[in-house]
Amino acid sequence: MTQHRLVIGFVPLLDCAPLVVAAEKGFAAAEGLELELVRETSWANIRDRLIVGHFDAAHMLGPMPIASTLGIGHLKVPMIAPMALNLGGNAITVSASLWSSMQRHGAYPGADPIIQGAALQRVVRERARAAAGPLSLAMVYPFSAHNYELRYWLAASGIDPEEDVLLSVIPPPLMVDALRSGQIDGFCSGEPWNSLAVAGGIGRIVTGTSAIWRQSPEKVIGMRAEWADNHMPETAALVRAVHRASLWCDAQESHSELADLLAQPRFVGVSADIIERGVSGKMVFAPGSAPIEVPDFLAYANGWATFPWASHALWFYTQMVRWKQLTASDGAAAAARATYRPDLYRRALQPLGLSLPSSDLKSEQPNAMGSTETGFFDGKIFDPGDIDGYLKT
């Protein structure tokens, strides 16, 4: 079989796993692909190298292809996402000092994000009265689920992300050092960087973002639309290979081997026991505390985690509008929706005889703590058929 070589960029996070497994466990080779995985430190590097053609495809934040297609924050380069890589996998972590202040106001490990948010809101007001200056919180990229989930939680907790705190961008592998040095008071990032902060004694996990939005969208495979148009067979082969790899990643019996694989310096480069916390969803929220099983913390395949829901793209679009990164328009909404390509996903997986989602859109309903329903912690509903109505709530 002829092997087609694809160069794919990634950032060291647990959700690069399906790409790593596709390359290392033979799933790509079975589809006639040779994957060269190139590790990068920052999402800006991933964006730039994909734009100029150094990469054929990349491990990307869900909103990144949308921002590139719309030309906000950087160059306007049409991109697509033919499949997702995971759901969830992020958390919000704060310094030991800030956590101590939050505990005085009712926070505790594993609590509902409503309780944690109320505690943080009281700390923010307390600091304002004392003229202590705003807290500094970091996320990984302006066009990221991390930015939007962090802002969503803050705003729902009565904290204005624009006025009450300082938000900055720091690449995921640098988050722990920034927290250790006191440059930031907390961050929202993917695993394993939250668990590494806890293991080092400098951080406390406030909440997994799966508690803010259960089965929330995260990473995708992104590629330039022009490249995809010229490489449809390779794109379909990549989707099939990564789909099979995602099933392997989600199997409980694979978790130990997956953690060992990702622990290699050329991939994530963090100890396997730290990695396995996020992979298994058994998170340690504070140093010395017992692991807490977090429902749906990270899914590689379960719940159709790899399906590129157009409704996810539309929710990201609403957040770009909400936080004034973009002016609302029917054209922009249509372009955002068209960036996610469930048609290519279905076409690629059709030979496997799978029962795939028949719709490109799904509503997100409220999710109470302990519920098995997907959706938001604050009772809000997202109906992709009523974008204008959602933006008014």
Image (spheres, grey):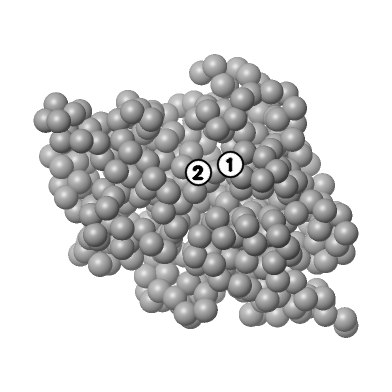
Is residue 276 rendered to the left or right of residue 31? left
Q: Is residue 210 visible?
A: no
Is residue 24 rendered to the left or right of residue 136? right
Q: Secondary structure at mark 2?
A: loop
Relative to 155, does residue 212 appear above or below in the rendering? below
Relative to 263, does residue 236 appear above or below in the rendering? above
How far is the residue under mark 1 from the one under mark 2? 8 Å
Mark 2 belongs to which amino acid?
Pro
Residue that badge 1 annotates: 73
Q: Could you tell me which quadrant the N terminus lies in?
A: bottom right
Q: Secondary structure at mark 1?
A: loop
* Residue positioned 65% across, 80% down in the render: 25
Q: Position of residue 215 (x, y in %)?
A: 53, 46
Mark 1 belongs to which amino acid?
Gly
Most foreground residue, 67 or 59: 67
The reply to whether callout 1 and callout 2 are in contact (CB within 8 Å) is: yes
Most foreground residue, 101 or 162: 162
Is residue 326 rendered to the left or right of residue 274? right
* Residue positioned 80% across, 62% down in the render: 235
In primary-sequence order, the first of circles 1 and 2 is 1
Q: Position of residue 47 (x, y in %)?
A: 62, 55
Residue that badge 2 annotates: 142
